[in-house]
Image (cartoon, helix red, strand yellow):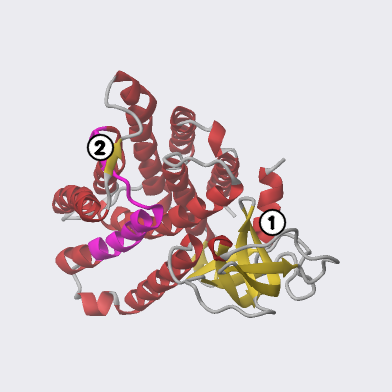
Amino acid sequence: MKKEKIKLYILEVLLFVFLLIAIIISKRITYITLSISLITYTILLKITIKKKKILSIYKKQVFISMIFFGLIYIGLFYIFGFYAYDFSKTPTSFGLKSIYRYILPLASIIITTEEIRQTLITQNGTIKILKLDISKIILFINTVLIDILIYIRLYDIKELDDFLTIMGFITFASISCNMLYNYITKRYGNKSVIIYKLITILYIYIIPVIPNMYIYFRSFLRMIYPYIIYLILEQTYSKKKLRVTYKDKNIITITTLIITTLITMLISCQFKYGILVIGSESMTPTINIGDTVIYEQYKNQKLKKGDIIVFNSLGIKTIHRITKIENINNEIRYTTKGDSNESEDIGYITKENIIGIKKQKIKYIGYPTIWLRELFNK
């Protein structure tokens, strides 16, 4: 392996490690800190790796198109917010403080990220798995992680559950966006991506009010919109016909969107089904630590003795089995018990406490969440 390729892999792995640590301690990482780190990395990258030029006859047209797409994105966001939500003030009012702490550092992060992307996306690594260049995979992961670090600071994270939910939404959206950014950079250079990201990220610190849109709808828009942009750009500027160049990718992208949408619906728990990772032994051997339970939202369905339900107990989601149902003064009271517990739970619950009814169990896939929870609580 050539020395230049070794340097390429070392630099990419170093960035990955830094970004992973930054996400774990995201509360302590400011935009200024991330900006300075990425500027330093970009300088080191430019000294070490030669940037190759990208030739395209449509750079100017795509640049103008991305400005147009960015403005439409903001318009859709506000139009949807006008009909479905109320509005609130932005996190910070526009002024010298917001320029110094947010706008300039974010602009720097965006520009350096895209310089890193364009420098590395034109390089060819020597290690491949299933014909996939490992260097390109690491680059994609790193740009997604940077995107996550940008958006995760927009939300108030107090507990691990908040962190995991927000991470899920942001990750799906960031994957979709960075697929588009890679496509544009490889064909038309990084300036079009930079202007689009500047418009769609910095507006929140410039416009005085924003819609109080739930995170899952905001992320869903960020997942779908890049796919629409791709189709338009491909059909408008590709030298070959869309049906020839995109047939296989089209199927893969649609499938990915469907899967991520379904996962988003489960994580949000705002639709018919939700998910719960099991972190205790109270339901063994029926449900074990590390299992993930899919439950149906409780909408006054008829419950019977023996049903396993998810309910709110002192602010904590608990999953236990119903052992007794009583009607006292026209109030239905449910007594619950963990299968491995010797005694029933103290007190009773009513329908106001019930969140959902267990439907399916998936073994083992909840362990990463448990490990992260332990790390988070240290």
Main secondary structure along the magenta-highlighted residues: helix
Quarter containing the C terminus: top right
With respect to residue 105, does 197 lie above or below?
Answer: below
Q: Amino acid at mark 2?
A: Val
With respect to residue 163, does 266 lie above or below?
Answer: below
With respect to residue 130, does 182 lie above or below?
Answer: above
> Which residue is found at the position 55% from the left and 53% from the top?
164
Quarter containing the N terminus: bottom right
- The residue that mark 2 highlights is 209
The residue stretch that appears in magenta: 206-230
The local secondary structure at tag 1 comes to: helix
Residue 363: in sight, yes or no? Answer: no
> Which residue is found at the position 42% from the left and 44% from the top?
151
State left or right for residue 66 relative to residue 177: left
The local secondary structure at tag 2 comes to: strand
- The residue that mark 1 highlights is 370
Determine which quarter of the picture holds residue 94: top left
Residue 243 numbered tag: none
Classify 10 Å Cα crowding around label 1: few (below 14), some (14-19), many (20 and above).
some
> Which residue is found at the position 61% from the left and 51% from the top?
315
x and y, in percent, of residue 248 in the image:
35, 78
